[in-house]
């Protein structure tokens, strides 16, 4: 059966490309991205060991009744155990086919982000001699942390689904609701950030009628307020205050900086801007401790160089003129960077956590450079 599962998952990746990407040239790129994603997923399966194995084993050890309870009553790690029962337990997937199944979900999310870029970014800008689209979608770490059994893959899928659904709210309401609910079950605090970021973005969107902005934007922010007590309970935060949040961040950073986590970097004494830089653009070459860190260093240097180019092309004005979904992804990136950088003290964990915000960074970079190029084209004409 494991061979059959592997074959079905492999073929379904091509089906997803055909379902989500409509143009022939985009489908050809999508096929290449899927093959690249599969290779990284296989690498993760055989050479990277951690929570992914634990989720697979936990699913195998559950029975139907206990899995259902976890699926509907638990969040975070225990929800993951219940969710994975249906694959490693009920269906009996081996570790490879289970990994490839999660890799397919991560790729599904990647296709949603790819489609957002197609629909919202009109000009394909160059960096040096390279066109940013679809080059940025081949960033190895983007695939690496969305290709294995774990929360990061499911969140990547859920956020992509949620953001893509917002391109057409009336027709994709169920997609939006499912993506948001899934993000909440995997990591409630990320769902809260999504509600705040996209709710604020919708209110700021000058392209939409004001009554729609007030109604939907307020509804999202009200949902965030409703989620707040549950999120505070999940992260064990007793009150919303600067002192309590700072204390939580310091404790979390300390826990994630211990030697057993590996690749640790003490960020507790960093000023906020340096924490943000560390979250977004490290590891760099002075942080290398293995092949993945080396690959990530090249990737981060590339992103950093593009970031400098973005800074020279009126990024604030471009944000103001951006479509609602790009505004939301950018605010999600900013909120995530500010809040998560204070709670993480380990480079490996930072890369993993950054991955859910990375598509927002990529699409915003592409939008800013596209907007600048559009302005130059209008000026010439």
Image (cartoon, rainbow, N blue to C red):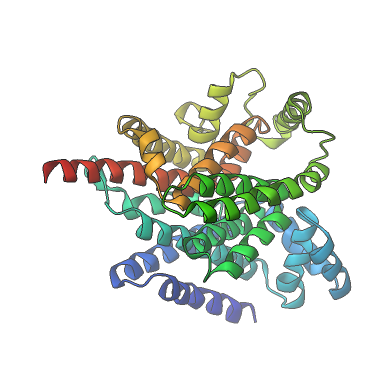
Residue placed most toward the observer, 85 or 50? 85
Which residue in the rendered view is the most extreme toward the front? Answer: 211
- State the quadrant of the N terminus: bottom right
Name the foreground residue: 315 vs 343.
315
Q: In this view, does 85 lie to the left or right of 192?
A: right
- Mark count: 0
Q: Which residue sits at x=70%, y=72%?
A: 87
> Is residue 373 left or right of 76 when viewed as pictured?
left
- Residue 342 visible: yes
Where residue 199 appears, as percent x and y from the top left, is: 58, 48
Q: Which residue is drawn at 30% across and 73% down?
A: 24
x and y, in percent, of residue 191 in the image:
66, 51
Residue drawn at (58%, 22%), measured in percent from left and top? 272
- Tell me if I can see residue 150 in this picture: no
Q: Is residue 183 left or right of residue 171?
A: right
Identify whether 155 is placed above or below 127: below
Q: Which of 45 and 31 is in front in this view?
A: 31
Query: Height in image: 331 above or below 36?
Result: above
Looking at the image, the residue that sits furthest to the left is: 381
Q: Position of residue 283 (x, y in %)?
A: 51, 33
Residue 318 is drawn in which quadrant?
top left
Position of residue 7 measured from the top left corner of the image (x, y, whole percent): 53, 78
Residue at left 67%, top 21%?
268
Q: In this view, does 361 lie above or below 151?
A: above
């Amino acid at each position: 059966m494991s061979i059959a599962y592997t074959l079905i998952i492999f073929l379904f990746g091509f089906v997803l490309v055909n379902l989500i990407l409509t143009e022939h040239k985009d489908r050809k790129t999508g096929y290449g991205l899927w093959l690249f994603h599969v290779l990284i997923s296989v690498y993760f399966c055989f050479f990277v060991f951690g929570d992914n194995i634990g989720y697979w084993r936990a699913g195998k050890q559950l029975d139907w009744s206990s899995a259902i309870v976890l699926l509907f009553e638990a969040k975070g790690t225990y929800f993951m155990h219940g969710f994975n029962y249906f694959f490693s337990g009920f269906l009996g997937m081996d570790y490879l086919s289970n990994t490839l199944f999660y890799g397919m979900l991560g790729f599904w999310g990647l296709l949603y982000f790819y489609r957002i870029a197609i629909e919202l970014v009109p000009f394909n800008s160059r960096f040096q001699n390279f066109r940013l689209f679809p080059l940025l979608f081949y960033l190895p770490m983007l695939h690496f942390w969305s290709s294995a059994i774990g929360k990061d893959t499911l969140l990547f899928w859920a956020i992509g689904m949620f953001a893509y659904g917002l391109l057409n709210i009336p027709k994709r309401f169920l997609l939006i609701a499912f993506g948001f609910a899934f993000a909440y079950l995997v990591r409630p605090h990320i769902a809260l950030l999504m509600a705040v970021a996209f709710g604020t973005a919708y209110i700021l969107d000058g392209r939409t009628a004001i009554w729609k902005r007030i109604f939907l934007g307020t509804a999202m922010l009200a949902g965030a307020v409703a989620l707040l007590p549950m999120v505070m309970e999940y992260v064990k935060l007793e009150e919303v205050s600067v002192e309590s949040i700072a204390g939580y961040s310091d404790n979390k950073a300390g826990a994630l900086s211990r030697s057993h986590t590996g690749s640790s970097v003490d960020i507790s004494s960093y000023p906020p801007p340096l924490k943000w830089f560390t979250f977004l653009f490290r590891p760099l070459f002075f942080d290398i401790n293995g092949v993945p860190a080396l690959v990530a260093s090249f990737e981060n240097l590339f992103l950093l160089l593009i970031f400098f180019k973005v800074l020279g092309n009126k990024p604030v004005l471009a944000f103001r003129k951006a479509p609602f979904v790009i505004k939301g992804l950018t605010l999600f990136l900013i909120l995530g960077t500010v809040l998560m950088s204070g709670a993480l003290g380990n480079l490996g964990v930072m890369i993993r956590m950054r991955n859910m915000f990375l598509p927002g960074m990529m699409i915003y970079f592409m939008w800013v450079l596209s907007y600048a190029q559009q302005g130059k084209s209008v000026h010439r004409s």
